[in-house]
Image (cartoon, coloured by chain):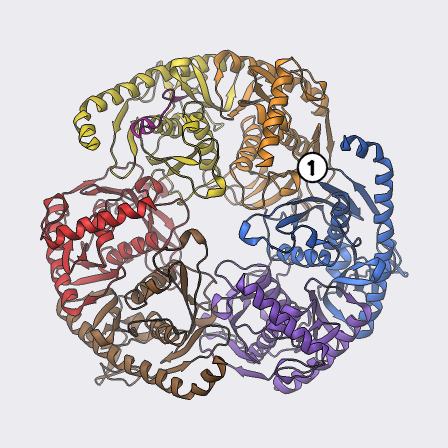
Chain colours: A red, B purple, C orange, D brown, E blue, F yellow
Amino acid sequence: MGLEIIADIRKDYVCNLVRGGKREEGRGFREYREISVERDIIKRAEGSARVKIGDTEVLVGVKVELGEPFSDTPDKGVIITNAELVPLASPEFESGPPNENSVQLARVVDRGIRESKAIDLEKLCIEEGEKVWIVFIDVHVLDNDGNLVDAAALGAIAALLDIRIPNERYGLTGENTLPMRDTPVAVTMAEVEGNILVDPNFNEENAATSRLTVISNADGSLSGMQKSGSGGLKEEEVVEMVEIGIEKAREIREKYLSPL
Amino acid sequence: MGLEIIADIRKDYVCNLVRGGKREEGRGFREYREISVERDIIKRAEGSARVKIGDTEVLVGVKVELGEPFSDTPDKGVIITNAELVPLASPEFESGPPNENSVQLARVVDRGIRESKAIDLEKLCIEEGEKVWIVFIDVHVLDNDGNLVDAAALGAIAALLDIRIPNERYGLTGENTLPMRDTPVAVTMAEVEGNILVDPNFNEENAATSRLTVISNADGSLSGMQKSGSGGLKEEEVVEMVEIGIEKAREIREKYLSPL
Amino acid sequence: MGLEIIADIRKDYVCNLVRGGKREEGRGFREYREISVERDIIKRAEGSARVKIGDTEVLVGVKVELGEPFSDTPDKGVIITNAELVPLASPEFESGPPNENSVQLARVVDRGIRESKAIDLEKLCIEEGEKVWIVFIDVHVLDNDGNLVDAAALGAIAALLDIRIPNERYGLTGENTLPMRDTPVAVTMAEVEGNILVDPNFNEENAATSRLTVISNADGSLSGMQKSGSGGLKEEEVVEMVEIGIEKAREIREKYLSPL
Amino acid sequence: MKEGTERKLIIDGKRLDGRGFEELRPIKIEIGVLKRADGSCYLEVGDNKVIAAVYGPREMHPRHAQDAKMAVIKYRYNMAPFSVDDRKRPGPDRRSVEISKVSREAFDPVIMKEYYPKMAIEVYVEMLQSDAGTRTAGINAASVALADAGIPMTDLVSSIAVGKIDGEVVLDLTGVEDNNGEADMPIAMIARTNTITALQMDGHLTKEEFKRGLKLAMGACHQIYELQRAALIERYSKSEGREEKKRD
Amino acid sequence: MKEGTERKLIIDGKRLDGRGFEELRPIKIEIGVLKRADGSCYLEVGDNKVIAAVYGPREMHPRHAQDAKMAVIKYRYNMAPFSVDDRKRPGPDRRSVEISKVSREAFDPVIMKEYYPKMAIEVYVEMLQSDAGTRTAGINAASVALADAGIPMTDLVSSIAVGKIDGEVVLDLTGVEDNNGEADMPIAMIARTNTITALQMDGHLTKEEFKRGLKLAMGACHQIYELQRAALIERYSKSEGREEKKRD
Amino acid sequence: MKEGTERKLIIDGKRLDGRGFEELRPIKIEIGVLKRADGSCYLEVGDNKVIAAVYGPREMHPRHAQDAKMAVIKYRYNMAPFSVDDRKRPGPDRRSVEISKVSREAFDPVIMKEYYPKMAIEVYVEMLQSDAGTRTAGINAASVALADAGIPMTDLVSSIAVGKIDGEVVLDLTGVEDNNGEADMPIAMIARTNTITALQMDGHLTKEEFKRGLKLAMGACHQIYELQRAALIERYSKSEGREEKKRD
């Protein structure tokens, strides 16, 4: 009960700020918190990245293992994306099997990678119908101060940039690198008091009526979108969010995903 | 609590009616509610049937897929029967894994099909020990107004009557039809106030002390029985129920499973 | 609530006894309750033993089946140890998947067998990387009056002593016996009121601040140890417990595991 | 979205099922089809067959999940095992968990949850036969079932998907189009106020294609809204006598 | 029931284990074999070895499953992994779920549940070694364990199966008979009143065979009832001193 | 412990990573690394990277697991899927269940649980990169995170493993040493009072080796204790200003 009262107070605080044209941390409505991306930090993984957006922190590890293809795509590798909202990261998270929030997080991150065709899945086929590389993208949330989607999606593509195919471990030869073909970037916006806020933090997420994630590719096209939250959006708001999303993605891509 | 009071009132109402020689809907003690059987209504299924018994409605779909035989029957196909008591169908049903009621429903339906040898499992073997057809019988309950067993069992055998073996989908040749060898029919009776009621509806099920399902074959022999409920039955009652069950099954078979 | 009061009273009773140099049943601090070991009592199992220590009773069955080796040990058989704390055995046990107590019990029993190298796993390999014998050690607790670990570990090694490799069932030829190479014995001690009690019964377990299980081999070396419980132990206590554990194991081995 | 677009999905300006680019599949709506549910709706869109049932408002279980200020909406999207080509294992998978969440949120703005603190309003949607567009079909059916159950709502929710096939933005993809097309974008909308309550997209769309698709979908939601209304009006006028009887 | 009846199960009018058609396997009953349980019974029938324990009446968990008017009976039939030829994975499967339900209902008419509102009476049955007829062996053991736990019952429940092998209706199938036979029909009964409280059948029986089998099984339940009673009487007379001690 | 010791783990009196027998791997400790947690610690030992967070004291869920006399400690040791060579399936396995139990018990003697009846004190430990000795690294990190969260404790807990490689008792095994060595014995200890609060062993040790190893491990716990203290002191002095701010 006490917790709910505090949540209401925080919500009011955020809404008041926004009505006055302000945000916590003195940010502008279209401004991200400070972003940092560290790559290749987990030895045991074939690719990894730690992304911080403000106090939000996400670790993404990519493991590549040999396995069987799906029967309807015998000549393609497999991507499996998983997100763990471990209770370490937030007082709201609980132990247990994935719930709808972690499922949605994993599926939205997966959608960006998959639909942008960032990974050339055909290059992951070793023997049609028998042996392909399976790329496990594991999102491990460490600190949840809001906007996990953007952090996780950025971590995923950053981790994939350095991916090493572990041919040696399986006694195979071949290319160990896997050049990415695109760099999808997710940009999430929240609607608070009729305003569009880029990169909502935890308090802003709770004050928002709805959120929209826009995933766009290097050429400015869209590869994924997801609305969440209990409010509605007008056509012109959605269109504006898409424009902002594409523009912000371009900035992030240039700054943090340069090597491509 | 309120719900329990209503349940008690309904129970009393049913018992009073029965003591006066009557049933809801003006039915006789040995009379089924109106039955309807629609076959082949789901395109994606290899066989399907929608059965209504009064307001009770069950949809049974049969899928046939290639798989491995059990190690102790390498030359036989496999039947897997599953029942979902989805919460759509009844305020009493809950989401979640199968509970004892859905397990019992599936197993009783399965027993009739299996023990009557209605399906010639040897004809479902493609390569001994390696490849056989697996027949998935999925009972999907849509509206539970009592006597799910009879509706599900009738739906299962009706769906199997038109079963198509999907040879083409797997690049195989061979017969696409699978003639049924028998048509087991389940007839359930409830004991209410010392009387035997055929085809109990939901209120009668709740008023009954016990129920007996009798599954019989085209030749009048028995292939399965199951008592349920918390009451006891006398020998002569059981014998009478078996006689009624066989007779009622004959009527249903003639009327609704004619093509055999 | 009532149960907790009784638990507290029992705890006080045990502590009082111990402070006076006594134990329930008039035992000495270093004394086991009466032990009985019956071997080869389950026909369906390839090895089995019923062990009673006082009122504690455990049944261990060993099944041997053909399967695949682990990929990192392609030339070795597999041991899988499982413990079921079925609700039949204790008012504290509940139905459901293994909890931390049954997991710990299984893993400590497993550790003794595995680390003592009692089973020559290489003799369980039939075809490298393809086919090996899998040894399932199933601990079924029947009556929990404390010190399940020692009973389960003794049951496991006793059951393994007579193990029959079921070559015939799989159409194979070869040795049907599997001589054990060692006989690890677990000895558990509890600290109650600063005293070390060997073989704590249920009440003593609840009164103890901590327990230590010491598993030792025929040559007096150690193959496993596990402390449990919420108290701490001093170096000299641990060392004393290890000395006692090795000595007691020697006695048990001689008396109950003679055929080796 | 698959990569291969070798299969021609548009021939002579028409789609494989003969539809124009901006044409809906035929829709059939039946109301009150289930006895035990408080409200229900059977709906067909092309080859999709879906049934929705509503229970509640009734006591929320488990209790610790109750909301003291408003009703909790539960929404369960489920596929029957036989509704798809390869049998689906019973029970929720990740896809259905996500769809259930997105669908529930599509109704959040219209259901008057504050009328029923501590209660649950439960929506169950079963896909009996599927051919792409199941989540939108489910939302359309659920919307009518909620009305049939008498749940207070500010308005109905209507839903449809647009997609891209052979480079063209088209309405309401079939399974073949979805599997061989380039993009899919389902939306849900309160037609009366043009408020978008659900929006997902996957595949490849330029910004201009997105804008065109959004307009197309919003227009189609208006058509669907009229069908939903018409079905409810027909049902309401037919069942007057029945309602009278119930009131006794 | 398997189809192949090539294996001869009856030779010279005798079954493979030498029994006549209407003969039970040897039964052994031990009472009070467990310390922690409130009541317990170890029972052998032929090669079946089963142990049953009873706990309660005690507080029912979880609370929302309590019944304000009477005790709830829990019944858990479980097979030890090593009790069968192919190791059984631990935990309940569909078969054991069904058997647990049918067995629980077999006791519903005799346990005086109304004495203990909101409480649970828990019956746990573990199959240690199995050779067909495990559910009936379990019911027989549970019946005695309930009596040993002092649970008020109107009477004991006794249970046995009949089956058909090589075309003959016979009593109490072994595993070999069950696997190669044509029908199996387990029943449970209150012997004193000839009331049937459990009945299942699978396989193939004509109506006449069914009637004959039912009579045969009911007769055998009377035999088992006498064995259960005798074991309880023996136990009771032996343990008088012990009971006295407990009362202090 | 593997059988094959063909791989030489000691060459010229030094271990493969150049360490002496009684030498710890380098340890790095960072405190207060997470915003949302009440206390947190990031710790590296050699190639192990672990992060621990503490929440509470806060309300214990589910309620029936509350203890009316004291706080309940929850401890969850978890490996990230990418922390090991072969991807680990997410979620608890038997190994992590056992480690969580042993680790929780290591803190039982120091946490003043009686201050917070009915509450939970929750410790979450995530292994991000592993190279043997993860449970002891986790305990060391958890100990500091508990202090950072302000949980009242009588003292810190420090933890390390000893093992046997190539017949020698050595401190703090690496993954290569663990996989090819002969024994592993992790302990946890309250350094100030030399009280052992966790102890496990597996492999092969003579009684003398055990005694030597125990002494070695206890000595190393003192070193770790000093590192833990030093990190807390540094953090405390640095963050004074921050603490002041919080108090406003």
Tell me which corner region of the image, top left, top right, bottom left or bottom right, holds residue B82. bottom right
**Depth check, front residue: A192 or F88:** A192
User: Residue at position x 73%, y 50% from top?
Assistant: E138
Which of the image's four quarters has the N terminus of chain C?
A: top right
Can you say which quadrant of the picture contains the C terminus of chain C?
A: top right
Q: Is residue A186 left or right of residue B46?
A: left
Residue A24 coordinates in the image, percent (x, y) = 14, 45
The residue nearer to you, when weighing E86 against E154, is E154
In the picture, measured across the screen, residue C234 lies left or right of residue A76, that is right
Q: In the figure, A255 relative to E220: above or below?
A: above
Image quadrant where residue F60 sits: top left
Left/right placement of residue A241 relative to residue D122 reads left
Q: Amino acid at mark 1?
A: Ser
**Is residue F152 on the magenta stretch?**
yes
Q: Is residue D86 above or below residue B28?
A: above
Q: Position of residue F218 (x, y in %)?
A: 41, 15
Give coordinates of residue E28: x percent, y percent: 83, 45
Asked whether residue A125 is in view, the answer is yes
Q: Which residues are magenta?
A: F144-160
Residue at the disc numbered 1: C48
| x and y, in percent, of residue A117 in the image | 23, 59
Q: Examine the rendering and report whether any part of residue C185 can be seen.
A: no
**Chain designation of label 1:** C
